Amino acid sequence: MNKQIFLVLTVILLGFGYNCSSAEEKVQTKVDPMAELNALLKPARVTGYDAGAIQPAKVKLTEWDKALLPVVKSAYDKMPEGYKLEVRGNADASGSSKENLEIGEKRAKYVHDYLVKKGFKADKMVVVSKGEDELREGETDPNDEDHRRVNFRVIQQ
């Protein structure tokens, strides 16, 4: 009788283990296919904007061009068909929500046009403004200059 109980418990536990591993495998297959490219793009943001400014300071753009444009270009070149580079403009919280959306869009459009001049194809990019909706994590001052930026990510279109 004890052997029968042992066998039944063993079968139940093996079945439970099988179900857990197949659920785990299903979760792993739902990983964002662009996660690697987006991780590469995360630090490649354009910064150096004065409050309300559309263009970054020239020295900041020159530094970005040398250090981070190659990172953006590498991710852009690796994008598969059906994906685009999202150019996302952001603002601090110093203006109204409407003004900040407009500033974010103008910043993103400026960087978009800059990338086109550098050889990126306009139809493989999309301009988006987040205004003040995506303030940088860890910043306690909503008007801090770190919120004034343009960042990138690869999205499916």
Image (cartoon, rainbow, N blue to C red):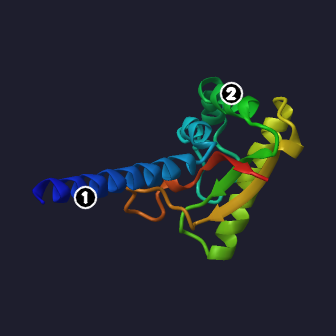
Answer with left or right where residue 120 lies relative to residue 92.
Answer: right
Label 1, on which residue?
8
Which residue lies at the image location 74% right of the left edge and 36% below the top edge?
Answer: 79
Q: Earlier in the sequence, mark 1 or mark 2?
A: 1
- Residue 111's image quarter? top right
Above or below — where is 88 with respect to 75? below
The Cα–Cα distance between marks 1 and 2, rounded to whole angstroms, is 56 Å
Image quarter hosting the N terminus? bottom left
Q: Nearer the viewer, residue 41 or 31?
A: 31
Classify mark 2: residues with Cα within 10 Å, few (<14), some (14-19) or many (20+): some
What secondary structure is marked by label 2?
A: helix
The amino acid beneath tag 2 is: Ser
The amino acid beneath tag 1 is: Val
Whether label 1 touches label 2, CB < 8 Å = no
Label 2, on which residue?
74
Tell me the mark number nearer the camera, choosing from 1 and 2.
1
Q: Residue furthest left?
A: 2
